[in-house]
Image (spheres, rainbow, N blue to C red):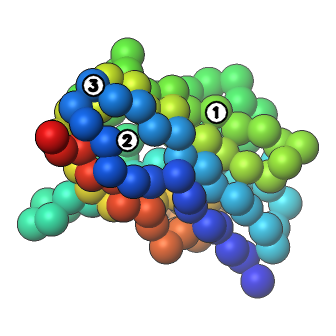
Amino acid sequence: QVQLVESGGGLVQPGGSLKLSCAASGFTFTNYAMRWYRQAPGKERELVASITSAGGRTNYADSVKGRFTISRDNAKNTAYLRMNSLKPEDTAVYYCHAAPNSRPAFGSWGQGTQVTVSS
């Protein structure tokens, strides 16, 4: 079955850093674009970052641009989100999403990992 497992979340102080990982299995990883979303309490889920299947193009939400970096290691079937200069407003559950190149409007979700930025 298709499986996405996020890890790396935790509690950090403002200005700190975290690196999230998304381990993928059950599908051809190299045929999928990867995305990171987040959802804060009482807020709608928002797209944070995306990366094309070959890793040649990335996109970021304005709120994280310059602070977050999405990457992927196709040999490891893993996507990453490096988060620097974290702010309290970055607090959310972060979700990994895999979208097939053939059907970019569809895809699979991971279970999420909690990121809390607080003093």
Q: Amino acid at mark 1?
A: Ser
Q: Amino acid at mark 3?
A: Gly
Q: Between disc 1 and disc 2, whose residue precedes?
A: 2
**116 relative to 74 in the view: left or right:** left
Which residue is most to the left? 42
Q: Between disc 2 and disc 3, whose residue precedes?
A: 3
Q: Between disc 3 and disc 1, whose residue precedes?
A: 3
**106 relative to 46 in the view: left or right:** right
**105 relative to 31 in the view: left or right:** left
State the residue at coordinates (66%, 45%): 79
- Check whether the beta carbons of the residues at disc 2 and disc 3 lie within 8 A of each other: no
State how far apart marks 3 and 1 are (Cα): 21 Å
Q: Is residue 68 above or below residue 46?
A: above
- Check whether the beta carbons of the residues at disc 1 and disc 2 lie within 8 A of each other: no
State how far apart marks 1 and 2 are (Cα): 13 Å
Q: Sort mark 3 into few (<14), some (14-19) or many (20+) by Cα contacts within 10 Å.
A: some
Q: Position of residue 74 (x, y in %)?
A: 83, 43
Q: Sort mark 1 into few (<14), some (14-19) or many (20+) by Cα contacts within 10 Å.
A: many
**Residue, disc 2:** 48
**Residue, disc 3:** 15
How many marks the image carries: the answer is 3
